[in-house]
Image: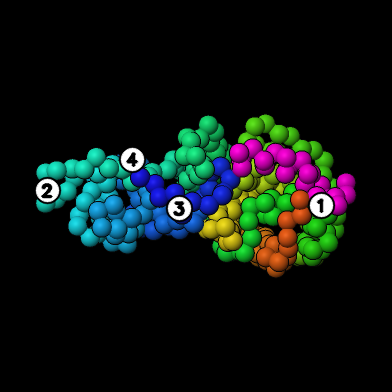
Amino acid sequence: MRSKNTDSFFPNSWYRVATSAELLAKKVIPLHYFGKDLVLFHTETGIPCILDAHCPHLGAHLGYGGQVKDKTIRCPYHGWLWDHQGYCAGIPYSEKVPQVKIANYPVMEVNGLILMYYHQRDESPTWKIPQLAQYDSKQWTPLRLVHKWTARTDLRNYLDNSVDVSHLYQVHSQTFKAAKSDLVEIEGPVLTHKMSQKCNLSSLSSGGLISEDGSVTTTYYGLGYDVSFYQTKGTLELSLLQIFTGTPIDNNRLEIQIFFSVKKALPSPLNQLLALMLKKDTVTTFEQDIPILENKIYPSNPLLQEEDGPIARSRRWANQFYQ
């Protein structure tokens, strides 16, 4: 049974816990998210699974030394087998199989990522993360990790920062000259925010090839996963896709990973150079946010201005994931 004394108050949502490449290479991965130890493994039939990490027999961690055996994971201590649903599937030295279950969690694999669904009351998900057409497209570079950060913050402040329009040109002036919120659309667990921006082209050393006028559409699928499409027009049309993921480690720490892909608008060597420049700019921009996120509070009644963007509306939308 699930040990409730380690549970903390986290929003109900899908969260990135690994990449498909990591799981393919390692087969078994120990995890620590949501204030608890977990184990991720890939059955020999190709099913990604997540269980609470400790074997109920004598407490061994299945993620350290555990081995995949067909559709089960083998405990490194005494060899007990546990299937993808968490049920005991066999004991190598006994014919008696106890009717006991390790907690398991919904998992999906999409866009090269392994996602886990967390729910405070263990309810099953009623929605999923969609596949991106760009992920398999030859017109886009392969989706790659930009960087991974562990920040002393939570998802409430992380969301505020993401939809905050005015901070873009106040904090990130090396990239943005101006920004304006144009449209917010909400449909259940999905929020879409469209912005127009003026880019500071010196940050990209563009030489006038890219127009400073651009747009970005960010779609939030719950609170742990969002996708942004950036576009500029000019002599060169720049299209950038970024996936932002925030997964709670515990009540005080958030693991943030950003992934990116660039539409191939130039010959291969130049396109690679453009991708490297955009990657560097993404790291610089986000690392400017970290000290603010780590030291700010979460005011329940902030003094918002219209230019700040849809902070109040996104907070109301986010309430559904805490219920």
Q: In the structure shown, which secondary structural element does the residue marked by tag 2 occupy?
A: loop
Residue 24 left/right relative to 258: left
**Distance between the alpha carbons at the discs numbered 1 and 3:** 33 Å
* Crowding near the residue tagged with mark 2, few <14, some 14–19, many ≥20 C-alpha atoms within 10 Å: few
Question: Mark 4: which amino acid?
Answer: Gln
Q: Residue at x 58, y 45 (%)?
A: 11
Q: CA distance from mark 4 to mark 1?
A: 44 Å
Instruction: Choose mark 3 or mark 4, whichever is in front.
Output: 3
Separation of residues labelled 1 and 2 (CA atoms): 62 Å
Disc 2 marks a residue whose amino acid type is: Ser
| Residue 53, label in figure | none
Residue 232 colored magenta?
no
Mark seen at residue 5: 3
Precedes in sequence: disc 2 or disc 4: 4
Prevailing secondary structure class for the magenta stretch in the rendered image: helix
Q: Is residue 76 visible?
A: yes
Numbered badge on residue 85: 4
The residue labelled by disc 1 is: 302
What residue is drawn where x is 70% and y is 62%? 293
* Sequence-earlier tag: 4 or 1: 4
The span from disc 2 to disc 3 (Cα, nearest Å) is: 31 Å
Q: Secondary structure at mark 4?
A: loop
